[in-house]
Image: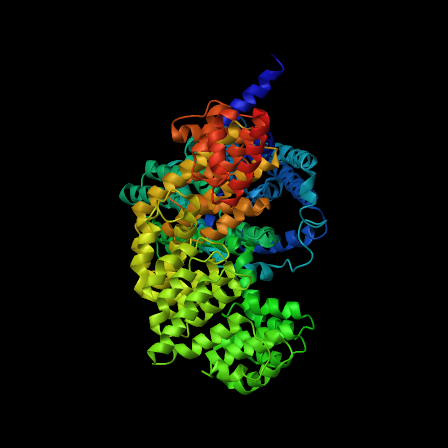
Amino acid sequence: MHYNAPAAMVSKLERFLDLRPGDLNRGSFLALYYFFVIAAYVLGQNARDALFLDRFSAVRLPWVDFIVAAIVGGILAIYFRIGRTMSLVNLLAATLCFFGSNVALFWWLARIRPARWLLPVFYVWVGVFGVVAIAQVWTLANYVLTGREAKRLLGLIGSGGILGGIAGGLMSTLLARRMGAESLLLAMAACIGISVMLVLFIAARNRNITQTVNSTAIDTTRPATLRESLRLVRNSPHLLTIGALICICSVTTYVAGWQFKAIIREVLQNKDAMAAFSGTIGSVTGMLALTIQIFLTPRLLRYFGIGVALLILPLGLIAGSVAIIASGALWAATLLRGTDKSIRNSIDTAALQLLYLPVAPGIKVQAKSFLDTVVLRGGDGLGAAAILLLTAVIGLKPAQLGWIVLAALLLWLVIARRAGSQYLATLGETLRQQRIDVEELQESADDRSATQMLVTELRSDDPSKIIYILDLLGGRRWKDVYASIRTLLSHPAPEVRAKAISVLRLMGDSSVASQVEELIHDPDLRVRTEALLFLSNVMGRDPLSLIRHLGDFPDFSVQASTLAFLARSEDKANLEAARLILDGMIKDRGPSGRLARREAARVIRHLPDKFAAYLCQLLEDEDAEVLREAIGSAGALQDRRYISPLITLLGNPETRPRAAEAILRYGETIRGSLGDHLSDPAISVEARREIPELLVGIMKRDARDLLLANLRQTDSVLRFRIIAALNKLHHLYPDLELDAATIEVVLASEIMSHCRAYQIMGKMDGHLDQLSFNVPLQKSIEHQLERIFRLLKMLYPQHDLQSAFVGLRSQNKIGHDSALEFIDNAVKISIRRLIVPLLDGEISLTDKVNFANRVLGSSIDSKDEALLGLMDTPDPWLKSCAAHLIGILGLTQYRTEVEQWTSDPDPVLREKAERAWKRLAAYAS
């Protein structure tokens, strides 16, 4: 019991901090590292301010701050050069050791040999330490943690820094009062020494940090100069916005900080009193920042996103600046300073660090180091220059500077809003670059090389391959390879010659009539037959005169050619004869009946309108070849009598493409019929599934209302097709407004179904490792997610949610985390609170089931209840899971349902049901 107590406490603390199991162990040492670095920095700040202001006036502060800004670039260049020669861990440890030895030297000089020059040197040194040491903490965290872990642990690590600020403030107050301001330097040296040990300890626990980069801390394969760093930032809109945000923040807070110091100098004269007061302010604001960090920052980022978080600090500083302008008192300066310290060290730091998440790993260290040092201190330099100009030259008092601060804060708000938008845009661009859309890639490749590939294939020596290519083209792209088809009339293989004549006949190409006429004498009967049909159908030649002196022809070819000739006559007797021939061909069920009916279906398109009614019989034929030819004729004739049969044939996989092509040729005239059939439950669901895309192709933007009206169809596949059609419609016509309320209702329904799937999974642990159960279950979940994201795309067309969906399905953890972060910032709170927990791959199945129970307000308490849920769903994938379970478990009480499923139109469910039925029959016997 005693052994498990610490683990139980850790688990409770992780739940309290909204962390995952193991997060506290990973983040606590980074938090300690940040704690001692910030404690050291606060001790140094309080010591330098007290010692400096004891000898110099506040007017001289900008000069030393300006020196810090001026030399930090050179220091960073040296830092980069050293980093190219040693590992990251050694670089961090060596840098801290250097700072530790420096501060010990400063203490000795201050106590043993005090000199006037020492104070400004120490002031500058503390500024450099703060820039480099704090940036190193976040650099180490960048390599130890993944992006998603960093977002969770940012609050914990930041809390370490805030506690360090509190501790540094308390130590400053205590030591300054008892031992003098110089004693703060020894405490600072001790904190730096502990930080060195923590760096080495973290490195030992996370050896991968030396493997994520080269053998050196700074990549040696690219320039690591200040000029290259500036180029990286300038060429990236996102990094440029971050740089602008850091700069305006630095300038504004520097001026506000100077106001605080100047007013303290006027009110408090003694150096020890100033150090103690600064320490007290640091402790109080640190405690406030810690409270904000623990209770407010995570929730603010989760519910309102990074864009709102970046606005909190400038809005808070506006209140403090107004107070200083109004009174100029110490309390107003304290309010301004307290707002800055409490919010900047909590909400603003967390939001600013999150801005780096979408930055490419290859440039993150170099760009971030540049921004966190050169740009940060450059902003201080600009602030120092502004102070010098406004106070020494113009003569403004500290309170009057409040107007300058207010103007800068307004600019800050504008840049912060831009940074939030740019963050989301950069995340989206990162996802787009990672996205590989197989379908679009395939289509693109086909468009570029299809024609050349087909021409090459038609030159093949294999007759079967040539015929296959011509069949594959299906009449839609014959013109692309027309010249090659004409050469096939002289091909050595008779089946190829016959096929070439047939294709040219269907194209109605009369320019090859002389070549085809020569083929009437071809030794092969198939070639002669096709030539006869060509000359009679295309050229109107009398078939009887053509065959009088030739050999035998199949009956269907003679009938078809004679029919085509007689039908063109105005003589009533000839027309009656033509009707008799056509009727006989349609009713022929003999050995050659299929060929006769197929030829009848072909020839009808060339006959007068009075023969059009006969095609209705052929559109109900049982032979697929006959149906395809009949569909082609229906599309050419465009008689409204064929609409209903054509829509019915959409449900037949063998005739679906040809039927869709024929329907599209009707155009706007059948929009009403398509809408009626889409909503008619008497029509087969297989046929209805094909209608949404046809509606878009025919009705264009006018298809919106019909699609929205049918958006709540119970069949999941049909619903997906409607959603996909609306997506396509919205892509084609971005200005088209969709009914957001209807879409949100359907989206909520899809999310509920997704939750139900996880509830079922929670009761099927013993079957999840069986492919015949798990594969269809995962397919159903995948289809649910795709419907959810397509609906989201309609609600948020300005965001690339398709790329986010691809990123979520990726096995790459960085891509997955980036997609989650994108969704977390792109969609509104009510939606992301429902979907993000279900999408996060790091959340366990148990937690997802518990979340689904809370969302649905009910739970699935047994495997039998889960099975009934699978059976009741309209999703064929989930029904196939139910069939699997029924068959495996031998649940004969469900034999009736399984028997019904064996005739289901969905092939997956039908196959599973047939297997289950066989097992149940075996159990029963």
Q: Is residue 826 left or right of residue 119?
A: left
In percent of the image, x 57 and y 26: which residue is there? 889
Name the foreground residue: 132 vs 617.
Answer: 617
Quadrant in the rendering for residue 860: top left
In percent of the image, x 32 and y 55: which residue is there? 675
Question: What percent of the width, then of the height, locates residue 454?
Answer: 60, 71
Q: Is residue 217 left or right of residue 122?
A: right
Name the foreground residue: 384 vs 24.
Answer: 24
Can the viewer see residue 458 in this picture? no
Quadrant, the C terminus: top right
Name the foreground residue: 317 vs 426.
Answer: 426
Can the viewer see residue 489 in this picture? yes
Looking at the image, is 828 positioned above or below residue 67? Answer: above
Question: What percent of the width, then of the height, locates residue 186?
Answer: 60, 32
Question: What percent of the width, then of the height, locates residue 784?
Answer: 46, 42
Which colour scheme appears in the figure? Answer: rainbow
Seen from this angle, which residue lies furthest left?
326
Q: How many marks?
A: 0
Quadrant, the N terminus: top right
Looking at the image, is 622 positioned above or below residue 497? Answer: above
Question: What percent of the width, then of the height, locates residue 356?
Answer: 52, 49
Seen from this angle, which residue lies furthest top?
1
In percent of the image, x 42 and y 57: which residue is there? 620
